Image (cartoon, coloured by chain):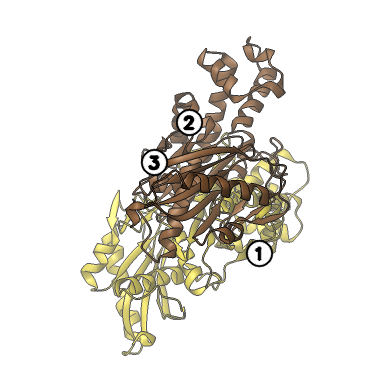
Chain colours: A brown, B yellow
């Protein structure tokens, strides 16, 4: 039966949400993207997601049974099944997504934050298969992370383990949306890269095409394109980003001693421009017993599919859990 | 039978080593301290430790059976059973202590580094009993740490998880014995406190009794005593130490989300002078979802007994493990 089953993976973002039917090999059978309509309450999105699920269900062979639903969402708490104070959604203080979905579907349902979903996806379908200890970093607008320990995602005492984006780079550093100063994600993220460029434009004198772009118009994609054309400020911004990322990843190793660290998300798509210098700084900052032993890799999931595959992996994990089977390994 | 059993806990230090017979309640039945003689090879210490064990064994009732041996030692690798390149012992590159002890005793034997032993001790006999997630920090000459995850000590992929002493406070900061710069233990430890005093003596102008002590003669105990008498430099040194410790403990929380953090070791004995300001800075640096939820506590083990009790706890853990019993909870 299991070989004919599939799960629904849902990724809820501030702008768009994705829904995919995924089998236990991590193959996406069908998928669709819909606008999140972030200003609407959660129940409206829920109805629209259920409509999409039913539509997709009618497109797959009838013998393929639906085994569970997994959701990745900002500020999601796996232990409570809730999304709490999501920064870009007009949902109020707390929405119990698991309960809402279970009113419609008599299936295992689970929710976790997008970075944790990415980590479970890496563990079940990506580069971390058969690894016991790994860290997954998502580099998008912010910096998210999920930590794998003993073959399981780590939630910790409060359900919020793996918030590396809010570890401190410089206690007197950049203002963070979280209210603190100098958090890692104010330096290492798409927005962090833009802030670094602004700082370098002030500090240095070289000509740069980026001097003609207003701060509010500047994107990480422009910086990437400028760096590809050897723009000195853009190159320096990637190098500065890599140095801070390498340093903080070395710190992360000193906590959980992973076998590998995976970089995923939009900024990781900058590829060698970011990952090559990050590897060099990372090795420099590693404590001696770890040197040369920790792999720093790009995500093993297909580009742009990490979020849906991660949510699907979470669903498969819950299915194994609910049926008291041993943790599912494809 | 179990209620009549005991284990041997051995703490190997650079100057002295301690041996204790400990029952499953964490009661030390008898103990002794011997000079380590760090310039001698490991086999010499092993013979002397075995002599001490036999002597102590003859002093306890004959119906108390010996169930296992646990050892805490610098640079110990639990997964390999070895002590590797110990900084203060003339033991060469690698000594397999587990093998050496098992040539003498047909018992479960395990070795781990002193901070990991302290963490297991806290988990079995101290303040972390019944906790699933906790961090134990030992503040001595250096800064050691052990991380509890899902009720077990975390070793990670290489056996070296929990080396928080070598996370980075300032990449351009103080030289560390490990070869890096700005490691946490160069600021937060007995020697780190002395270095901070030297820095403050240069920076500030207030009179201080510490201005009359040569750097090589300065001890953390003197700084503690000066602070108790309101010496402004000593007080500022404790405050600076607390700020850095609070900041890095907040970072540690963002990795594994513990229920509590325990401070043990010589410097933690400074008590309120260190722990009160550390708590304040720690709360300031915590990411919002953790604020007000993580306890920062002194070790629940009797002062000066953490090392032997930790080594004994490791032995009890191995005994449960070897006999395929569920993890042992006193």
Looking at the image, the residue that sits furthest to the top is: A207
Disc number for residue A294:
3
Kindly give the residue lying farthest to the left in the view shown: B103
Label 2's element? helix
Location of mark 2 (residue):
A278
Q: Quadrant of the N terminus of chain A?
A: bottom left
- Element on which disc 1 rests: loop
A286 and A156: which one is in front?
A156
Q: In front of the other: label 1 or label 2?
A: 2
Residue A220 screen position, x and y as percent: 59, 25
Q: Chain of mark 2?
A: A
Is residue B308 rendered to the left or right of residue A77? left
Q: CA distance from mark 3 to mark 2?
A: 13 Å
- Report the mark closest to the observer, 1 or 3: 3
Disc marking residue A279: none
Task: Give the image location of residue A102, x and y in percent.
Answer: 56, 60
Query: Would residue B175 be visible to someone looking at this image?
Result: no
Q: Which residue has dot 1 on it?
A: B271
**What residue is shown at x 72% (from left), y 56% (from top)?**
B280
Disc 3 is placed on an element classified as loop
Q: What chain does badge 3 belong to?
A: A
Name the residue nearer the viewer: A209 or B30.
A209
What's the CA distance linking mark 1 and mark 2? 40 Å
The image shows residue B146, relative to residue A15, as above or below, that is: below
Image coordinates of residue A97 in percent, x first then y, are 61, 55
Q: Is residue A92 above or below residue B126?
A: above
């Amino acid at each position: 039966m299991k070989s004919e089953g599939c799960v629904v993976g849902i990724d809820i973002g501030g702008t768009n949400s994705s829904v995919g039917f995924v089998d236990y090999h991590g193959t996406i059978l069908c998928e669709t993207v819909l606008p999140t309509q972030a200003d609407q309450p959660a129940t409206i999105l829920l109805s629209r997601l259920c409509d999409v699920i039913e539509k997709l269900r009618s497109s797959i062979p009838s013998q393929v049974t639906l085994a569970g639903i997994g959701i990745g969402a900002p500020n999601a708490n796996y232990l409570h099944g809730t999304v709490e104070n999501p920064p870009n959604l007009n949902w109020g203080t707390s929405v119990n997504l698991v309960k809402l979905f279970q009113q419609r579907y008599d299936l295992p349902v689970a929710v976790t934050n997008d970075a944790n979903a990415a980590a479970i996806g890496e563990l079940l379908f990506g580069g971390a298969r058969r690894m016991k200890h790994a860290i997954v970093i998502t580099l998008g607008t912010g910096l998210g992370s999920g930590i794998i320990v003993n073959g399981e995602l780590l939630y910790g005492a409060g359900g919020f383990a793996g918030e590396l984006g809010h570890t401190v780079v410089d206690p007197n550093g950049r203002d963070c949306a979280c209210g603190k100063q100098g958090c890692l994600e104010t330096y290492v993220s798409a927005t962090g890269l833009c802030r670094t460029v602004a700082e370098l434009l002030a500090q240095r004198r070289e000509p740069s095409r980026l001097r003609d772009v207003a701060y509010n118009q500047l994107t990480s994609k422009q910086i990437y394109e400028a760096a590809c054309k050897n723009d000195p400020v853009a190159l320096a911004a990637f190098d500065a980003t890599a140095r801070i990322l390498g340093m903080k990843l070395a710190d992360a190793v000193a906590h959980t001693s992973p076998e590998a660290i995976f970089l995923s998300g939009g900024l990781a798509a900058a590829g060698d421009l970011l990952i090559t210098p990050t590897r060099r700084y990372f090795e420099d900052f590693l404590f001696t017993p770890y040197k040369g032993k920790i792999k720093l890799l790009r995500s093993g999931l297909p580009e742009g599919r990490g979020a849906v595959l991660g949510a699907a992996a979470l669903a498969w994990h819950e299915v194994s859990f609910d049926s008291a089977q041993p943790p599912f390994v494809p």
